Image (spheres, rainbow, N blue to C red):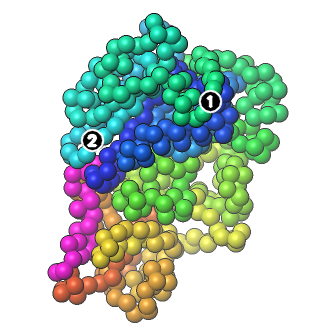
Amino acid sequence: MLNGARTAAGWTLILWDIENVPVPEQLRDPSGIKQLKDLLKDRFAKTRSLQLHCIKLACRWPDCRSPYATLLGWLTTLGDVEALGYQWQGQKDKIHNADRLLKQAADRFMHMLELHGGPEHLVVFITSDQDFCEKIQELQRRNFKVVVLYHGPSASQKPVSITSVADESHDWLTFLKRELGFSHLTLAPYDPTAYHGASQGYNSGMTPPPPSATRQPSQESRTPSKACSRPSSAGAASPHMQRAPSQASHKRQDIMCIKVAREQDFQDQIGANQWFDMMDPVKVAQFWVHNKATVGEFKRTLANKWGTAVKSQRIWPWQRRQNLSVRLSSPVDSSLDGQRLADVTAPILGEHSETWFYLEEAKNDKPLVTINPGKMLLFFKLYDPWQKTLSYLGRCYAHNTNTLPALMPFLYKKAGFPDGTALKVYEEVKSHPKVVCDVIEEHVTFQQAQLQHGDILLVQQALTEEEAEKLKYPNVKSFLKHMSKGRATKPV
């Protein structure tokens, strides 16, 4: 998501047709996959003084017993990687294929950036498919640079047209050998129907599910935009939590894509390239979960991942409000731990889309705060008008009968301000189609201000008129309006 990102820096989008140009066999392990991802980010973003928007993979959904389930699981656990999955319906199928998904991704990236001018941006295609030539030329006409990484087994098979239209092209294996220092790399065709043996299942020691567990694709199935499951330690969680995506049937999917944000994500993102809402879902942890998995099983998966005891976890679904902002809805109560996760949550963008969670974690295995009637969870951002910076300040619970003075001790401590410092507080209401921030008056209760779970309050020091006149953006509202000008602020 390019939500309010500065145009002073260009962006890179990497589009990978992983069936056409697969991962070399020698890199098909967690450390090799990380090497590969870091190389792409370094060579096509960092060293070119660009920011990486995303690495988008396009592939057929693999069977849960396929080695590609594990491979794609490794890829999508690294951050900055998103998989665009589709259901193969034959060679003549032009609706559910990699070309269409990657071209759509290129269109979205192009339209987000070209309208606002700014620096030159880069699109990297990892493919040998000449069907992308027209899209490459369209990108170039609109001032985007294009790099192609192709696989040419021999000189006679090189995709001449796609390499000739690109601004820069490299043979995939030659590029990897040179950059990673390998003397020999081999490619095997991407075959998502290939199975491991029973002793080589999705997780070591896990018996593959019976063939009857794999549903066949329906002609009514919609095109999913999904990745594969995230691997976890053997035996650490229920088998429902370990399986990779299987096929969908009659508009219902067996696998849920869940993205989980934590406090650290807010700290890392807000003020870096995230100005509105709380997080960029592309940059948080992603899990693939069977829709029969329970809330408790998913919490155990999170405990295995991050070490937070189940009793110290509370998961909050994100929801898109009518004004297009993304905020928390009501938390999933611990009494529902035995319920199916699919029954107590809803996708953020509707049917067959992703579910986003915020994971609230009690520190040092302490019990979670009891949410009594009238109590709400609020998030805070801090604006520094002198440095023109925005940062994540923290979160706290407040009662709807409270007014701002009740929060001052918390805010002083978090911001490092002396007691008695005059503060100005706004509610971040929305960023699209225009920025709206409402002042929270000291005498108004939070109920009167219509605050609720997940609302974001923007905090800054109050300024005198003389101080304000000397500053370009004296308040957070003017700063956010500036950040929205000529930038893509439309929600994900």
Q: Mark on residue 182? A: 1
Counting residues from the start of the chain, the first of labels 2 and 1 encountered is 2
What SS does tag 1 mark? loop
Any magenta on residue 158?
A: no
Q: Which one is in front, 186 or 315?
A: 186
The residue at the point 75 percent across, 34 percent down is: 203
- Amino acid type of disc 2? Glu
Is residue 349 visible to the viewer in this orientation of the structure?
no
- Amino acid type of disc 1? Phe
Q: Mark on residue 266? A: none
The residue at the point 66 percent across, 38 percent down is: 30
Does 135 sit above or below residue 283? Answer: above
Give the image location of residue 457, x and y in percent.
38, 71
Instruction: Name the residue tied to disc 2.
Output: 120
Give the image location of residue 92, x and y in percent.
44, 8
Give the image location of residue 14, x and y in percent.
42, 34
Does 322 sit above or below residue 199? Answer: below
What SS does tag 2 mark? loop
The residue at the point 26 percent across, 37 percent down is: 111
Q: Which one is in front, 84 or 127?
A: 127
Mark 1 nearby-residue class (10 Å; few <14, some 14–19, many ≥20):
few
| Range covered by the magenta-colored residues | 469-492
- The image quarter in which residue 119 lies: top left
Q: Disc 2 to disc 1, how far (Cα)?
A: 32 Å
The nearer-to-camera label among 2 and 1 is 1
Q: Which one is in front, 490 or 461?
A: 461
